[in-house]
Amino acid sequence: MTIILPFKIPDAETRASADGPPDHPPPSGPGRRGTAPGTSAATWVESFACHRRRPQEVYWLKENAELLSLLRVMQQRAGGPAGAGGIGGEAALSPLRPFCDGATRQLRFFPQYYRFILSICLDYEDLTGTPAAASELAHWAAAQGLVEAELSDLQRAEAQQLLARRGIALPVDPGLADRLRRFTRRSATFAIPNRKAAYELTHIVFYLSDYGRRDPGLDARALQSLTYAGLLACLDQDLDLLAEICIALRYAGATPPPYWEQLLSHATAQFTLTPDGFDGRMDGYHACFVTLWWQQVTAVGRKAEPACRLPAGAGQALHIAAPATRSLLAPLSVWLMEAGAGPGRTAPALWQDALSHMAAHSGPDARKQLRNLQNSTPAFEAFWQIFSRAGDCHARYRRIGAGGLSLSP
């Protein structure tokens, strides 16, 4: 799944109070689960393919590519052939058939979106067992050298993974995997808030592991990076990012901290689905998708529940509202910026002061949330040392030479 970071928008309640009462049916409510297998997937596909956006929009491509990726995870969890696992086969995905039939023209006209277009056609074929020109499109994209237009190693890795699904091996890109792994090993990057870097980290794991089909070959420092990014996601109560991090940890053969997955488990029942309530702005669909994806990944190795299925309630231009959360990241960062500037302020002392400050200004629940996070992983102390930015960044240089700055101790 290619990354497009959405802007945060007011939740449904805030919009209703600002814009007047909604003119759509009431939401399905949190926690309502799936309908009969097949019909659930069909209504979701119809909503995303036909009602939320137009196929000419890049966000249509993104949303439908991500929905099909989720359905493919569900099918793999069910362990069945095309059309199995509550997906419903070609009938359920029929609203996407016109797009696949016209994908040759779509790809030629919008080659810059080749990864989205390929992803949709590949997943359509794999989910339905019926041809959708995915192999021809993949060969055309490779022959046109579209991958050579990518500046990002991450996008090259995604393209490589997509084309490999139809047996196309790109010319060897010396050092690509090594460069990706080098990025994952700089743990300090992920102890400072940077959502773009955190999403790049998780997607590197997805591509190196081929979405959990092989060992991505991560070392202890890369796992530490995922842990640091997860601590920040918990601080921010960012369910979308936290779900991706927990999936990446499991694809890397590690078990996420139980507290993190408890947060996700609680959230899965808290998404609110409003049929025909979508207004064109960003909603919580992606957080919903990756949380359901995480739910499927955690079920691997356990007896399958009867529910490799989507929640009920999809229909027309479906709006998905993520659960209300309360981030501590911004207020904590603002306080650290002001309180931690003086020399001699050690990280442990700042932590104790932070607990007191957050409890006084955000209530006792904030202190409890921070304590839960501290106790969730032994890596917290090292994370806090970096995140708190204790001390200052003054340094003296001795000289500037061919090798750059020579810094004094």
Image (cartoon, rainbow, N blue to C red):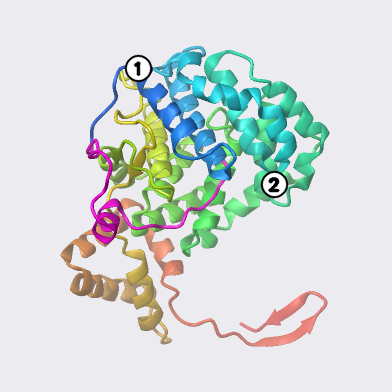
Residue located 33% across and 71% down the image = 331
Q: Measured from the top left, where is residue 144 in percent x and y?
A: 82, 36
Quadrant of the rendered structure where residue 125 is?
top right
Q: Residue furthest left?
A: 364
Is 83 above or below relative to 388?
above
Secondary structure predominantly adopted by residues drawn in magenta: loop
Residue 73 lies, in percent from the top left, at 47, 27
Q: CA distance from mark 1 to mark 2?
A: 42 Å
- The quadrant of the image that shows the C terminus is bottom right
Instruction: Determine which residue is flagged by label 1.
Output: 37
In depth, the one of 283 and 347 nearer the eye is: 283
Along the horizontal axis of the image, is 278 left or right of 135?
Answer: left
Q: x, y percentage for residue 335?
A: 34, 77
Q: Over which residues does the magenta segment extend? A: 1-30
Amino acid carrying mark 1 in the image: Pro
The residue at 36%/27% (across/down) is 299
Sequence-wise, the earlier of marks 1 and 2 is 1
Horizontal side of 324 relative to 279 (left or right) equals: left
Crowding near pointer 2: few (<14 within 10 Å), some, many (20+)? few
Q: Identify which amino acid the numbered label 2 is placed on.
A: Asp
Q: Which residue is mark 2?
A: 178
Residue 150 highlighted magenta (yes or no):
no
Q: Secondary structure at mark 1?
A: loop
Measuring 51% from the left and 38% from the top, which residue is drawn there? 252
